[in-house]
């Protein structure tokens, strides 16, 4: 019987993928909700799937149930043994990447040791150059070849490094405030074309992503994923310093600046720096004198929307 003839009555409300069993759908939904219900009792690592926790626990116990039938070397994961078996073939693709994989193993061992101190360790093999995560050491070694000889582009303001010039140019707009993409409906401006395209859905009233709990609709899949956590109470992002939990990564990242004292938003007119973007936007009005937010009750003008909202609550409500 072909896969096409198998009945799949359970559909994901986010990506519309079909499943044969409700349990498989519930397992798949964790991809969107980022729920990780399986937690290691030894360290703070948590996982979306039970088998990932089982594999992780072997790092603590030292168990290696998978053994090579040729050289009797043992492994904690079946996938690792399969990759190892290629060493016994005449055309061994690992030879080319042996040194890279050795360094990756050393780095991964250091990461595993860090997990004992309470840091959550992710499954997979993360590229040290870009955010991509690969399934095996061999895949990562192959992927890293793509970065070899790449040019790097550094932001002159905050010194952040990029591997593609368009990404640097896009980043620079955070400092300059340039917004070259304009909405023809409401004249709102955007730093990225993708943000403009998403914004256009507001005018077209397109909301293709619907919550299965309250039926509220959203223009973006990411907004639905964040909203769904209001129903589940999930807060998958944790501060490693004070253990405060957050429902989204950006809130966690902003919070960390309380501990690190990092101020990545720099004024181009004076030496001042800020931990939050909105603080920089507010500060820039002191240089430009622009006050685009207008009170309809008393005619007073404000540099940022938040000040207008506070004024309305204080003076007119």
Image: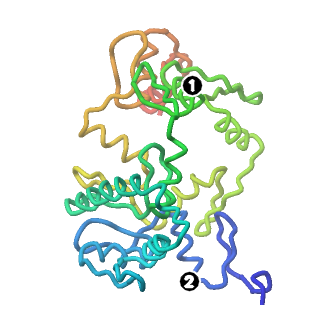
Q: Secondary structure at mark 1?
A: helix
CA neighbours of label 2 inside 10 A, class few (<14), some (14 to 19), many (20+): few
Q: Which residue is at the far bottom?
A: 1
Q: Secondary structure at mark 2?
A: helix
Of 98 and 302, nearer the camera is 98
Give the residue pinned by disc 1: 169
| Chosen colour scheme | rainbow
Give the residue pinned by disc 2: 23
Of 316 and 232, nearer the camera is 232
Residue 28 seen in the current view: yes
How far across and down, in percent of the image, does residue 66 sit?
Answer: 39, 83
Q: Are marks 2 and 1 in contact (CB under 8 Å)?
A: no
How far across and down, in percent of the image, does residue 11 sit?
Answer: 68, 74
Q: Which mark is residue 296?
A: none
Of 95 and 276, nearer the camera is 95
- Residue beneath the point at 41% across and 23% down: 280
Left or right, 278 with respect to 21, comes to left
Q: Give the Cα distance between marks 2 and 1.
A: 45 Å
């Amino acid at each position: 019987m072909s896969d096409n003839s198998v009945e799949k009555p359970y559909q994901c409300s986010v990506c519309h993928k079909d499943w044969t069993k409700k349990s498989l759908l519930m397992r798949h939904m964790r991809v969107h909700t980022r729920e990780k219900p399986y937690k290691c009792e030894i360290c703070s690592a948590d996982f979306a799937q039970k088998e990932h926790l089982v594999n992780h626990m072997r790092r603590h116990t030292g168990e290696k149930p998978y053994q090579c039938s040729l050289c009797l070397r043992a492994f904690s994961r079946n996938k690792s043994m399969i990759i190892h078996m290629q060493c016994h073939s005449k055309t061994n693709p690992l030879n080319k990447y042996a040194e890279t994989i050795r360094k990756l193993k050393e780095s991964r061992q250091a990461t595993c040791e860090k997990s004992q101190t309470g840091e959550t360790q992710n499954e997979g093999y993360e590229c040290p150059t870009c955010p991509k995560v690969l399934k095996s050491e061999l895949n990562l070694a192959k992927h890293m070849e793509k970065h070899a000889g790449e040019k790097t582009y550094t932001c002159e303001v905050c010194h952040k490094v990029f591997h593609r010039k368009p990404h640097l140019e896009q980043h620079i707009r955070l400092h300059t405030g340039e917004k070259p993409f304009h909405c023809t409906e409401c004249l709102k401006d955007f730093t990225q074309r993708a943000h403009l395209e998403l914004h256009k859905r507001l005018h077209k009233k397109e909301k293709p992503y619907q919550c299965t709990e309250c039926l509220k609709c959203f223009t973006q899949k990411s907004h639905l994923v964040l909203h769904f956590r209001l129903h589940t109470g999930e807060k998958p992002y944790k501060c490693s310093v004070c253990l405060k939990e957050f429902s989204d990564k950006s809130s966690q990242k902003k919070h960390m600046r309380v501990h690190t004292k990092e101020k990545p938003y720099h004024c181009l007119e004076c030496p001042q720096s800020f931990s939050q973007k909105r603080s920089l936007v507010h500060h820039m009005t002191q240089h430009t004198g622009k006050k685009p937010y207008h009170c309809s009750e008393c005619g007073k003008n404000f540099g940022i929307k938040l000040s207008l909202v506070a004024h309305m609550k204080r003076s007119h409500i």
